Image (cartoon, rainbow, N blue to C red):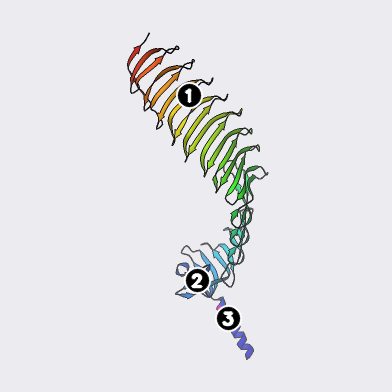
Amino acid sequence: MKNIVLILTFLLAVTTNAQVNYLMWENVDTQRFGKETLFKTDNKVLNGSYKIAENSGAYTEVTFANGKMVGTKKNYDFSGNLEQEMVFDENGKANGKSTSYYTNGDVFEDFNYKNGLKDGEWKTYDKKGKVQRLENYKKDLKDGKWVTYLKDGNMGTKLVETSFYNADKATGKWSQKTEDNRVIWEKEYTAPRNYIKKEYYPNGKLTSVETYVNNKKDGISTYYSSAGLLLSERTYAASYPITETSFYDNGNKKEVVNSKDGYKDGLYQKYYKTGNLVTEGHFKIGYKSGEWKHYNSDDMLKITYTYADGRRNGIAKTYNEAAKVESEGLYKNDEKTGAWKYYKLNGKISKEIEYKNDKVVSEKTYN
């Protein structure tokens, strides 16, 4: 008799545990206490096995104990295809290996949890079963080596991007390479947000060397031609260019531009390939300002203009080969105005022209 009672008790327990309850997710309430989550319906914690559906037809198979998910949870799409499996411990925390799937049943992602936190390797696969991304975590933080396999949309080249983390912070040497190990770019971190980035041409020559502080360009950056010649050198502060100097292929300066807050500001200089000045002047908040000088290739002064708000406003002069004034007069909003004087090579006045709105009003000639 005692044995019969035990058997009946066991069968009743199996029947009770096997019973599946059905719900809609919209009828399930959640209560969160820190990282702990309790699931309820009608203000009662869930217990037992459930199938819980979305309006779309997608559903979840899950077991609850005192409102907590326990055991294996399975998610299915609206067609009944298995999308994901996750394992929960008796405390309702994700633990161990979990897997998500493509609709054909192939593995899309393998990932691991420990006490409800991401831990260990996470792998993502393409539809051919090849690893597309490898991630590593420790206590829910990025930690260790990460590898991502990419494809250049323009060139069709397959790329491998490698990065490293320590407690969720970037560290070490990052890189992007082709499958045959040709370096596209590399970063070397000196602090979690500070690094030096180098980019390369297909022939292996440096394209650029840039310095970043707080993930912004800061300090000196250099840029090169595919032949290895220095093209330009820029100084940045918090991603804004401060000074840029470009160079000719013979190493001489080509142009010097100073900037402030993203606008040209301060001294500007342009050079001939020989090293002689072409032009020099100042910008103010992006506009030419003050006196600008223009030289010929022999380094002789040819023209001076006065600017205000980016337009010629004020006195202008041209010079002859004897370095004497050839003409002088005023501009107003880029138009000649008032009396302009023109001089002979010996310095004597040759004529005087009156302008209004850049048009000749009168002209007087001197012997």
What's the residue type where badge 3 is placed? Answer: Ala
Name the disc covering residue 243, or none.
Answer: none
Q: Main secondary structure of the magenta part?
A: helix
Depicted 312 relative to depicted 20: above or below: above
- Pointer 3 with pointer 1, Cβ within 8 A: no
The residue where tag 2 is placed is: 39
C-alpha span from label 2 to label 3: 23 Å
C-alpha span from label 2 to label 1: 79 Å
Say if the magenta span includes residue 15. Answer: yes
Name the disc covering residue 13, or none.
Answer: 3
Which residue sits at x=49%, y=21%?
A: 301
Q: Which residues, given as a range, are shown in magenta? A: 11-16
User: Looking at this view, is 249 or 316 the one in front?
Assistant: 316
User: Looking at this view, is 287 or 65 the one in front?
Assistant: 287
What's the residue type where badge 2 is placed? Answer: Phe
The quadrant in which the N terminus is found is: bottom right
Residue 300: percent from the left, percent from the top? 51, 20
- For mark 2, give the secondary structure: strand
